[in-house]
Image (cartoon, rainbow, N blue to C red):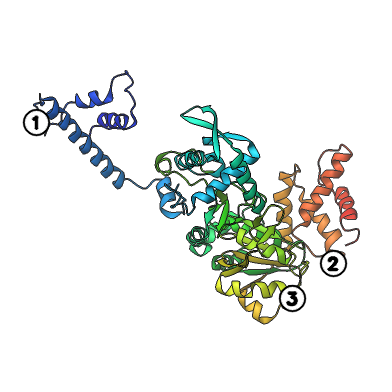
Amino acid sequence: MPDPTNRDLLSRVALGETTPDGTDPFSSLAATAPAEDQPQEQPTDPDAKFASMIERLHELADARRTDETDAAPSPEAEHLKNDFLPIEPDSLEAAGLTDSEVEALILKHLLARGNAIGRDIADQVKLPFPLVEALLWRMKGDQLLVHRASAPMNDYDYQLTDIGREKARRHAVHCTYFGSAPVALDEYVASVHAQSLIRQHPAAEDLHRAFADLVLNKTMLDRLGPAINSSRGLFLFGPPGNGKSSIAERVTAAFGKHIWVPRAITVDGEIIRLFDPVNHDEEPLPAANGLLKQKKIDRRWVRIRRPTIIAGGELTMASLEVTLNRATGISEAPLQMKSNCGVLVIDDFGRQRMSIDELLNRWIVPLEKRLDFLALQNGKKISVPFDQLIIFSTNLEPRDLVDEAFLRRIPYKIEIVDPTEEEFIRLFEVLAPKMGFEIRRAAIEYLIQSHYKRVGRPFRFCQPRDLLLQIRNFCTYYKRPLEITEEHFDHAVDNYFAVM
């Protein structure tokens, strides 16, 4: 086993650092006392001494690799082993791009910006600077750019020539996009398969973690578990106010936390924007260290929280197709594509602006084949994965909304029933302290007897929260201490159930 001191010196040699006392680690390593089983004589010839030193470096490096192999895998190693990780390309060809595509992005960026240094241009198109620098020199040779001034780190400030400005305008007429360089469609498809929900198998403990802030009985969790594990789709139905939307929103937490999505995709020169800050929550990698530091990430990709996209009554057929903004020439990916590897919730199913039959006919094949076909504005059709858990949430009976053929493709139908009296009281006990109240069991029992059992009113999961909010607002307005009392419950019920 190599001496730990030698390991430190080896690391410093590799990094080009000095030792704490300021000496050269290379000479310190050469002066290290040999192991007992090695010859004691030091070679006097300079070439032989240098060869001996290199041999020792190799021995120490081999021993270090052996130690790392025997050690337990680090979290970073597990991340690299189990997850999709987009690695920075070493050429435009490896990135699936042509010189002309990147050139058009640079020209449009400079047309909008006026001038920019090379590294800022590379940051704009999210490509390695050496690749962009070579292209900038070629564009300068073609008289599209000029060096406006020098910049730090052997860089230059670039500006368009009249020829470059005219060419940029022609590109902008077709499409104004000049953001991140796009990713090829094939790469995106491969990334979805690598991060697919089918590869995720949430267990009981994962569901308990995902629904920890909700009061759900074991029977409900036992029904939800297999449905979520199937990744096929489910109906959540039942009376309003029992938490169907809250359950649907938390399902994604039972799966892996993060996925990678490209900022944009290219298909035969057409740009489709996929990353959506409205529906996607960006989760950058932690500060680079260890194995992740050695792997340079392709900045054309964004690490996001596994998506949960909710579409309610505003859903239209246009939301399910690639839409082209004719003013900018930029296409937008449909909702089901943005929700790949995540969850798509169709809330208030049956109340969409589009007819139910239209929606079902659009998705009946993708639900069966897990493959969707999209038409681009240029007439080309592409196939993309249909890889998400679709949850239809409705207050209506599913059999009254859809036919048997569609119900067969949604294998799980789960009714969200009213809470029991015990669960209703438990909700008050969970929520009251969070909202600043002390729990008064007598007042809660008064509420149940006087305003529920006496009038035959059903319990709903949302009502404890809503009634406590009524009391808090009442106390705040009158500058009273936050208290749960019979009087306060009477006032809250009069407001809350006035027309219910």
What's the mark number on residue 401? 3
- Disc 2 secondary structure class: loop
Disc 2 and disc 3: Cα gap in Å? 29 Å
- Badge 1, how many Cα within 10 Å: few under 14, some, many 20+? few
**Image spot of residue 11 (x, y percent):** 31, 32
Residue drawn where x is 42% and y is 46% of the image: 90
Quarter of the picture containing the C terminus is bottom right
**Image spot of residue 255 (x, y percent):** 54, 58
Residue drawn where x is 77% and y is 54% of the image: 464
- Badge 2, how many Cα within 10 Å: few under 14, some, many 20+? few
Between circles 2 and 3, the one closer to the viewer is: 3
Is residue 16 depicted above or below 444 in this figure? Answer: above
Q: Which one is nearer the viewer's eye here, 14 or 80? A: 14
Residue at the disc numbered 1 = 39
Badge 2 amino acid: Gly
User: In the figure, is residue 242 to the left or right of 255?
Assistant: right
Residue at the disc numbered 2 = 456
**Image spot of residue 102 (x, y percent):** 53, 48
Is residue 366 depicted above or below 241 in this figure? Answer: below
Q: Earlier in the sequence, mark 3 or mark 1?
A: 1
User: In the figure, is residue 60 to the left or right of 320?
Assistant: left
Badge 3 amino acid: Leu
- Disc 1 secondary structure class: loop
**Image spot of residue 49 (x, y percent):** 14, 27
